[in-house]
Amino acid sequence: MDQPHRQDPRRPATRHGDERHLRRRAGTHPRTCAVLNTALRPGAVSWVPRCTRYRHRVTSAPQTSPSSRAQRRRDRSAEHAASSRFIPHVQGLRAIAVLFVVLYHFWPGRLSGGYVGVDIFFVISGFLITAHLARELTSTGTVNLGQFWARRARRLLPASLLVLLFCAVAAATPLLTPTSAMPAEVREILASTFYVENWYLAFNSADYLALTGEPTTVQHYWSLSLEEQFYVLWPLIMLLAAWIAVKFFRGSRLRAAIIAIGVVSAASFIFCVVYTITDPAPAYFVTFGRMWQFGVGALIALVPRLRVDNAVLSFVLGWAGILVLLYTAFTFDGQTPFPGYMALLPTLGAAAIIAASNTERWWYPTRLLAIRPMRFTGDISYSLYLWHWPLIIIAPSVPFWGLTIYHRVVLLVICFVLAWLTKRFVEDPVRSWKPLTSRRPRVTLWASLGAMILVAAVAAGGWAVNAPTYQQGVQAIQDVRENPPACFGAASVLDESCTTDAPDTILPAPGFAGADRPDEPQCFIQLNDSRPVSCEFGSDAADAPRIALVGDSHAYQLLSTFESIADREGWHLTTYFKGACPWNTTPLSTAGSFGAACADWRAGVESELADSEFDAVFTAAISNTPYAAAGHDSAFDAAVAGYREAWSTMTDRGIPVVTVVDNPGWETDPNKCLRTRPQADCNGARSDVLVEHDPIRDAADGAEGVTLLDFTDVYCDDDTCFPVVGGANLYRDQDHLTVTFVDTLAPQYTAALKAAIENGVG
């Protein structure tokens, strides 16, 4: 408990005497001066930064009413007090963070670890916000939570809700967003509006670092949601620690806050490492697994010894931090076990740059990060982060917009322009808008809630408008599956009797192809789940031929067609699927828990297959799976050997294996092009979209008891691959086939399996 000040009876009880005494004690030492400066009551003496000079201003001490004293307390709060000391090189660090993220999303292959920019933001936020809270806690003994949260709302919500409103309108516009994506878009816009997007993605086990699948326009709001949760929890943690220190231990509030933040950060880091090993997809998003990164920045703000002013040490520390960040940005990738212990590198790199505070020479990193272009980019970093991702997702759907390097550069410039406009006309005006700043914090908070509800209503209204179209799309897919047109899809190439021109109508429609997928998600195991889950379909008759369908997502894309075949032929179908984990004995090159989960799943499936009697096994796999070399000359040779070894567990028992060469994979979903352009404009060069050397083809070559199907001539000619064949839309995303198209290959799958069952092995 702070003790009341006792007046020295030997000194006159005047403010002048107190101030002269303090000035004599202060001398010109900056640190002593800073301490004594805070001891003086506001308005008594104005001190210049180094205390070498001062302007002495005598003020009267009028009696104040309770209301004016309350106002004074508000004025001394972090909301109304003098703002924190502006640190230019931290603004430059913001620029590095946002450029990492933006360039990673524009060119993921060039800056494969650019996602660490988000981690840099977390450290910066921890540093700045904790410094604000610590000043208020020191000067007032508490934190005005309402003022703090209101200020955060005025700072962050206007630009955030503006972009969400744009995304809600875009999602409701079929020209910009496929109708099949509407449900996911609306759900995630709602989650982002109320800042729980990170939890939505965690519960749905989204893999943020995966390069496949079709993310929504607001998926990047996961980090903003996590930061908002930090803004809610952090002052509560500091206040609780301060209250316990004063109430029970008569200790220092700040020391208690430091201890509490240290404990929380250590526990968070341990949780992060363990959770990343056991379940990496949700670990990327879970709030407590990221709190330690905020804590690192917070400790720099609270512990002065961690801020380095020595010229040499500051120079070395700053450049070391920059080099570490560059190293992570260029060497980390989607296979890096992240966050986990690997997140220490970008976190400590950012912390080192913040801690380096000496600015004596122009070549010091603190000076270079403070140059005007870096500060400008740092100023607009928040809006730039908000705008870049929706534009990347939407741009390919805009008529006449291409995917060349020039289009990407122009889009990047547009992002910068929109970010500056948002900063200039939305962020700054609302932050200082008097109708909000001159009223109680609850006015800002209620206004924020009202704006969030408005955005949510627009998103829900967009779904209501498009729901009938969505239902029509579902019905259209069902109709074409049950009654396909003549010479439709693969039949237009494989059936010699088909001489008619392809229909003009594309089925399923490009705006709805994303929904044309197997509807048995319980059969498809993903990420770190290693259970050998099996599903059973078709005939239950004891004498029914038994077929197994095994593989990754490119085997799962065949499920609906194989269900129909089993029902039609009287077969019993058993399935085993795991995403990104083909049926192969060669280990993946993927490090960490996912690679281990794949190995465990394979072992479990091998055991299940060994204990079962099948008449044939069908398998498929994506062609670009990353394999370890595993003692072979190359990863390709290892993959070929791994397929043969896995298949031999069946063929050695006299059970034939049927497999298929993989289909092409596109850089982006071709439906984005098909929605706005003629089919011919959406074709792709064969050399760009087709892996010519599929290890499955080489593995099947000459293998006894193995039948190979190859539909490459259906997908492509000698030079070009097509997104539409015989009026059938081939793809539901960049590399997975629609069920509608796979159904047109059913005669070939059926014939191959019948022949395998009849002929067996040898």
Image (spheres, helix red, strand yellow):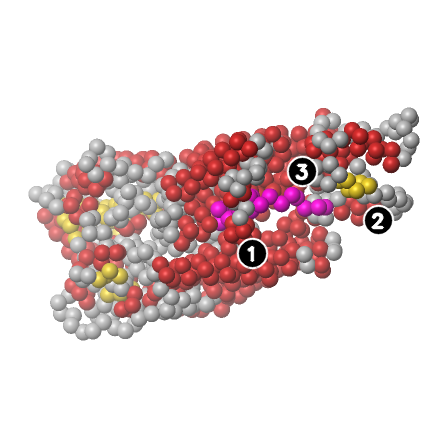
Q: Position of residue 423 (x, y in %)?
A: 57, 58
On the image, which quarter does residue 249 sit in?
Answer: top right
What amino acid type is highlighted by mark number 1?
Ser
Please count the marks in the image: 3
| Residue 134: assigned label | 3
Residue at point 47%, 53% (across, down): 219
Residue picked out by circle 2? 67
The answer to whether residue 243 of the structure is visible from this angle is: no
Looking at the picture, does residue 10 appear above or below residue 153?
above
Name the foreground residue: 284 vs 334. Answer: 334
Secondary structure under badge 2?
A: helix
Between circles 2 and 3, the one closer to the viewer is 3
- Answer with mark 2 or mark 3, whichever residue precedes in sequence: 2
Secondary structure under badge 3?
A: helix
What amino acid type is highlighted by mark number 2?
Ser
Marks 1/3: CA–CA distance: 27 Å
What amino acid type is highlighted by mark number 3?
Ala
Secondary structure under badge 1?
A: helix
Q: Position of residue 84 (x, y in %)?
A: 66, 44
Q: Position of residue 76 (x, y in %)?
A: 75, 44
Residue picked out by circle 1? 160
Residue at point 78%, 29% (across, down): 25
